[in-house]
Amino acid sequence: MTWLNAIALLVVTYLVVFFQATFHDLRHWLGVQIDLVPGLVVYASLSGGIITVTLVSVCGGLWMDSLSANPLGVSVLPLFLMGLFMQRSRDFILRDQPFAQFVLGASGSAAASLFTLLIIINIHRQPLIGWWSLWQWFAVSLVGGAMTPVWFRCFDWIGQALNYRPLGESSFRTDREIKRGR
């Protein structure tokens, strides 16, 4: 991943957080505040290095918390740990398969939401938890999983549009011997 891709990922993360905070139609229709940042962290962890994962986790978590009722910084650790776990085990993950991307996005969204809830409970805040919370957790996981393959396609397209394509090999081989003489 080049620095241009990392900047594009941070810009999209900012726009996604802004979209989540301002677009209320899906929240009224499903009864759930969607969370698309874990899918971006999954993409960053499978496509970039640890610095990209850290930037997306910290910036995305702080931007989300500044526009929500969460205490500032409570979303950073769950996003970072989820991204770190996936980045460390990315050699074993099928990155190019849409079903694997969906499963990783759904599990990352579910884990980040659950871990954020555990942190909020442990800092002695009183979140509203009930049976409706199970539906919200399921819907957030499903929407996060459904958007993860979209992020992969979108950023692959951005990478192809903004980065240089490698040149194909020429027909001239460097180990070829040319015999000259009469």
Image: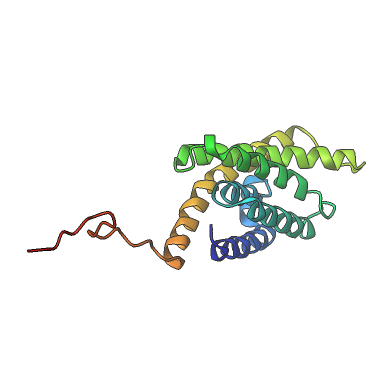
Residue most extreme to the left: 182
Residue 171, image x and y in percent? 22, 58
Q: Nearer the viewer, residue 69 or 42?
A: 42
Judge whether 135 appears above or below 48 on screen: above
Q: Residue furthest front?
A: 182
Instruction: Report the side of 181 relative to 149 (left or right).
Output: left
Residue 127 visible, this orientation:
no
| Closest to the observer, 132 or 166 | 166
Please, which residue is most extreme toward the right here? Answer: 124
Number of dots carrying numbers:
0
Give residue 41's position: percent from left, percent from top.
63, 49
- Residue at 85%, 52% in the rendered image: 71
Tell me which residue sits at (38%, 61%) in the image.
166
- What colouring does the structure picture have? rainbow
Task: Please identify the quadrant where the C terminus is shown.
Answer: bottom left
In the displayed structure, 182 sits above or below 97; it is: below
Name the residue located 54 percent from the left edge and 61 percent from the top edge. 2
Q: Nearer the viewer, residue 141 or 82?
A: 82
Q: Give the side of residue 175 with respect to residue 15, left or right.
A: left
| Of 97 and 84, the residue lying toward us | 84
The image position of residue 89, as x and y in percent, is: 59, 37
Whole-percent x and y of residue 4? 55, 66
Residue 157 visible from this viewpoint? yes
